[in-house]
Image (cartoon, coloured by chain):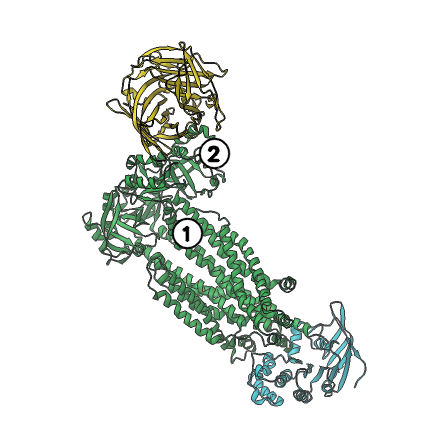
Chain colours: A green, B yellow, C cyan
Amino acid sequence: MTWLARRLVLRALLREWGRALLTLAAVGLGVAVFLSIRLANRAAVASFEQFTQGVGQGSDLVMRTEAGPLRESLLPSLRPLTEWGWMRPIIEGSFARAGTLEPFQVTGLDLVGLGSARDGQMDAPTGQAPASGTTALYTMIQVPDAVLITSALAEEGLRPGDFLDGFIQDRPVRLRVAGILPERPNQPRLQRNLLVMDLPAAQKALGREGELDRVEWGLRPGARLVDLEAEARRLLPPGLALEPPEQRAESGRAMTAAFRFNLTILSLIALAVGAYLLFQAFDASVNRRRETWATLRALGHSPSGILRLVLGEAALLGLLGSLLGLGLGWLLAQASVRAVSQTVNALYGASAARSAALHGGESALAVGIGLLACLVAAWIPARRAAATPPVQLLARDGGPAPLRWGPLGLGGGLCLLLGPAFAYGVPAPPGVAWHAYLGAAFTLLGGSLVAVALLPLFAWPGQGTRRWRLRLALRPLRRPTGRHGFAAAALTVAVGMATGMGVMVRSFERTVLVWIGSSLRADLYVAPLGAAGAGTQHRMSAETANAVAADSAVDAADRFQMLPMVFRGRPTFLGSGDMGIQAARGGLILAAGGPFPGPLLAMRNGGLHDPGVLVSETFARHFGVKVGEILDLPVPGGTRAVTVRGVLADYGNERGSLILDRPVFLAWFGDERVASVALYLRPGQAAEPVAARLRRDHPALQVRSNHALRAQVTTIFRQTFALTYALEAIGLLVAVLGLGQGLTGLALARRGEIWSLRALGATRWDLTLILMLEGLGVTAAGLVAGMGLGLILARILVDVLNPQVFGWTLHFSIPWPFLGLFSAATAGASLLVLAPAARWGSRLGADREAEEGA
Amino acid sequence: MKALLLAGLMILPGAGTPNAEEFAVAKPGYAFAFPRDHGSHPAFRTEWWYLTGHLWAGDTGRRFGYQLTFFRQASPRTAWTGSSAWRSDQLHLAHAALTDEAGHRFQVDERLDRAGLLAGSAGDHLDVFQQDWRVEQGPSGRLHLRMTVRGAALELDLDPATPPVVFGEQGVSRKGADPSAASHYITYPRLEARGQLRLPEGPSLPVHGLGWMDHEFSSNQLDQGQVGWDWAGIQLRDGRSLMAYRLRRQDGSQDPFSTITEVDAKGRILRSTHAFEMRGTGSWRSPQSGAAYPIPLAIEAWGQRFTLVPVLPDQELRTGRSTGITYWEGACRVMDDMGREAGHAYLELTGYAHSLKGRF
Amino acid sequence: MAVLQAKGVGKRFESRWVLRALDLDLEAGERVALLGPSGCGKTTFLNLLGGLDRPDEGAILLDGEPLHGASPARLAELRRSRLGTIFQFFHLIPTLTAEENLELPLRMLGWPERRILDRRRELIEAVGLGHRAGAWPSELSGGEMQRVAVARALAAGPAVLLADEPTGNLDRASGQAVLDLLAGLTERQGSALIMVTHSESAARICHRILRMEDGRLLTGAS
């Protein structure tokens, strides 16, 4: 058996290495794209999780407030709990490095307590013997600007004694590197962008003396977790909540789950396109050797044996291609990890992955998928080779059997109807989107089948024409074969997905631009320099905000604050803004609640006795909240009842937000810090000089004009989708390559024809043109079907998927220039690939001649 | 006594020899006032409260021993002292140990915290705590002790049988030739103990017994030639108490400043001398640290001879996390020269696992 | 003057000479049969004569013009206008109807529409296709297909018609019909014919019979 396999499979592959290589490339690319996205995802999310989980793994219980910071004054009442557990108080903040403004997470921990709690964990910076631990501690805790850095950062050249300049909150700071955090043997490597400070020093640096973000507890040896939990619950002061540490990790994972899933689905684009190509490749390869199979059968070889041979070849190609894809995928991951991380950071904050490690499980999954794709693709041709009686295989056929495009087209049309029906028809609670994905899949399938049915349509120009080349080129499309079909289908899928995503992205962009245009009305926007992304913790102190607002050129200043909050068990944001100023000068887009500025005035007038809130669309959808509903808002010291007055359009973050009027917020939270200030200048005041003045007076603040802010928001949105564009391009590349592969197959099928045409006196150029036109006919079918499919897909994405998953309402708009450009690019790429294939095909006759010789 | 040496361990190497002028030095003429002087003395660099005792369970007479030590250490003057909840200029360390004779076990726990929320001591009376360990003295003079160790919990009321005893000459206990090598040393040599002991496996036993409290504060370094010390607090049946410390020099000899003091049942110092002997009549080798301790230990002074026999051989504390010292401290029976049980003692042996000299 | 000439033509495959020192003169309107056992190199020789391959030695001249040195473009032009080919396996374009196949060379030459239609009608009649003119090759019998091929080959009025085993795949009746057609049409148009065959009876329509064996022509005429 192996004797045969070696000669039939291996030799054949080696002899036709060109085509084998193409198949390998198809598998490899599909696997590579899939794997790279998964690896980049992992890295970005791991980085994010590390930040949300905190540094000291090994906690058994976490205490947090539901809203607002945790005040230290609550802690003495928890002292009895130390009988069962050791207490770890934590405060967190952001540090932006000078120059690059790259974000770091600052974690403030009680370094003394930490050192005594666990043996050898995090006590002294490396290099110190444990016995002199207490003495070394003083070096850390008596220097208020001391930080410990991770070994990942140290590898870049930063050493104990060096300085780290940057910004915390609204002030420039100079931190001193005091040591390097030791890595623990079985734990994942500490994130590069982590700085650890002693707790009181961190509180001081952040301007949050007396505050904590959470208190973690570790079980004492000899104590039982049930006792710790029970006592914790008993002693828990009001306003604090208990959660097991996994919940933090889970909420981090849950937050990014939607984003990661979307990306994973997108990463399958290359595989989806590639699948068609693989079908085609294996079909052609089986077909080419039909004589061999027939002979084997005639010699008495069993059908299952042939099946094994063909599948064995497919498995070999699948394995080799997948392994190729592994290497390529790892490389691509390094390239894409920053983009993914940037997106996670922009949407959720706190991710700064820079490299993606090769993960065993993901690699195995990717190889498995590549292998499976090949086996599935080869299954039908293999069965055909094995099952058909030898006589039929030996008969000289007129070429590959034509497709029954009628039924295919009908089936495709049905799927095209089913797809949207699923997506729009199935009622689903927010967050659930399987019906949209299923609908999209049906639509893709339907579109690709319809493309096949469109092929005869493109044969029409060749119908009555006198142009013999055109006629010869397009006639075969009247009865399209499997090769035509596969190539067209593959192109359709690629074009469809790219178009669909492209239209959705541009719809998104337009919606956001309109939103920005309406919401951003102030002349200047002031925020701390390091502030970027949804999770930023940089804040301006009240003094700084007042100083900025007091500038002589300022007519009104809208102070905006934003706090993370847990509402009904889910992380979200609580914000506050000046409803009075907004109502008078702003232009928020309201999705519900009445015409602007009605709800805002209602909130201002309601004051503290009838407090109202605005909720973002995402919030409304995630929590199922409507205008007029009364919510229990967690505030320091309890909860307050607030009425929902309006629903806001907000594309800035995916966790949703709830906005209070500033006076109400101040009364309940007493937090005068500010995330940003929007300045409305007096009439006649020019923005630039004021901006320059403010920047000079407050070097740690960024002052942006309205125009600059709009540009920045747009850039962030573009960055968010950078990866999408890349994936679309790759999908298209695979499809176009498949087109080339298909054309070589088509040329081979027509080699007899080509030879006789040469005998009739057709030049190489004639033949090249004929083959190219045939290819272009297929391209045209794929393009048209793909565009149509893409538009339907885009509607599903815009109308169903986005609202379900993210809660946003987008306005569908068709970007004609983009579609035109994309079509041109596709056609151009096709031409580039078809030309050499056609040239190759035009020379085919020569072999035939040698065959028929003598 | 132990404090001095422990204090010596916690010096900042980087800062060089600490500037002793920053801190107060134990000098003759210190005016003791109680209950104020039971509290902390931040002007001094190092301070500790050292409580030991022997306990018997209500009816069964099952024997236990306890040790709870609170250390406070201040750093030299520094610009940044942290915040009031998290002080960077004062560290607190604590050891807790429980000896269970019948159960053949010796349980140890240690804590290291900065002064502030989790550890601290009052300045005007005895109230020192570290996390959930605490000892405080109420207005009636009764002390209340609470400690937990590895699932066991002890709550004791301790009533002083005598007023506080101030050791040393003119209120200063000297430890070496250097006049500044000295501390203020206050002791309750006899405390009537009564309370509850909850064992890790569950049952809560009523206990009663006899306790001892040492409280020392000083600012000074140890003499270079000394490698360790042996200390004993002996409570005799006839009401007398003996406190002895022997400083051992590198060459194996006994430092001339080693002292033994005798106190009567009313807490009055009867006599004190440097001329005495402490010698091991046997040896016990610790499997964990490899140190060989001279136990049982015989003490001979004023023609009297007592042998301290440990209730359990392994009462060694290996405090890697906090002080980094390994020492032996345990409950002992006191046998007279006729072999009869004459009382109880706590014995402390340091510098056998490693020279304390290297810790400077 | 000979319309097609071969002088000392030789062809090598790898290291083996399959043809050696072949000479041939074909006069205008002359019909020559090339007979020989299979494997003797007749089809190879035919391909060389038709400009579909290049000789490794010697020269081939069409109307005095050397084929072996001509550029691919020139060769194609010659094949369009001066040469016609018929194959054993017909090789009709499967996606063109019979009459579309037939008129293909004329379209390739860029003849005006009117002329193409006229000529097509003429040819269809000449080969007796009539009602089958609009059929696809897959619907035609072997004989009908070969008739279309003959018509196609002669459509542009070539000087030389090359036929490679034209009746090889046909039954006797169809084969005879095709042979008659070949003889008649070439006679009428004045085209020369060189036909490769292994059938003595097929060779009878020719003026001359040349025999080949092992890559060489045996001297002698018939």
Q: Quadrant of the C terminus of chain C?
A: bottom right
> Which residue is more in the foreground, A558 or C178?
C178
Chain under numbered label 1: A
Give the residue type that dot 2 points to: Thr
Q: Name the amino acid type tagged 1.
A: Thr
Chain ID of residue with mark 2: A
Residue C192 in the image: x percent, y percent?
A: 71, 84
How far across and down, in percent of the image, does residue A521 sit? 30, 52
Q: Residue C4 is drawn in which quadrant? A: bottom right
The kind of secondary structure element at disc 1 is: helix
Name the one closer to the observer, A197 or C184: A197
In this rendering, does residue A555 appear at all? no
Q: Is residue A193 above or below residue B6?
A: below
Outermost residue on the right side: it is C219
Question: Could you tell me which residue is drawn at 41 percent across and 69 percent down?
Answer: A416
Q: Which residue is mark 1?
A: A343
Q: Residue at x 51, y 57 (%)?
A: A368
Q: Secondary structure at mark 2?
A: loop
Q: Is residue B74 visible?
A: yes
Q: Quadrant of residue C23?
A: bottom right
- The answer to which of A21 and B181 lies nearer the viewer is B181
Residue A388's spot in the image, x, y percent? 57, 73
Residue occupied by mark 2: A126
- Which label lies toward us, 1 or 2? 2
Badge 1 and badge 2 in a common chain:
yes
Point out the tag, 1 or 2, that comes first from the N-terminus: 2
Q: Residues within 10 Å of mark 2 (few under 14, many from 20)?
A: few
Tell me the residue at 49%/15% (across/down): B252
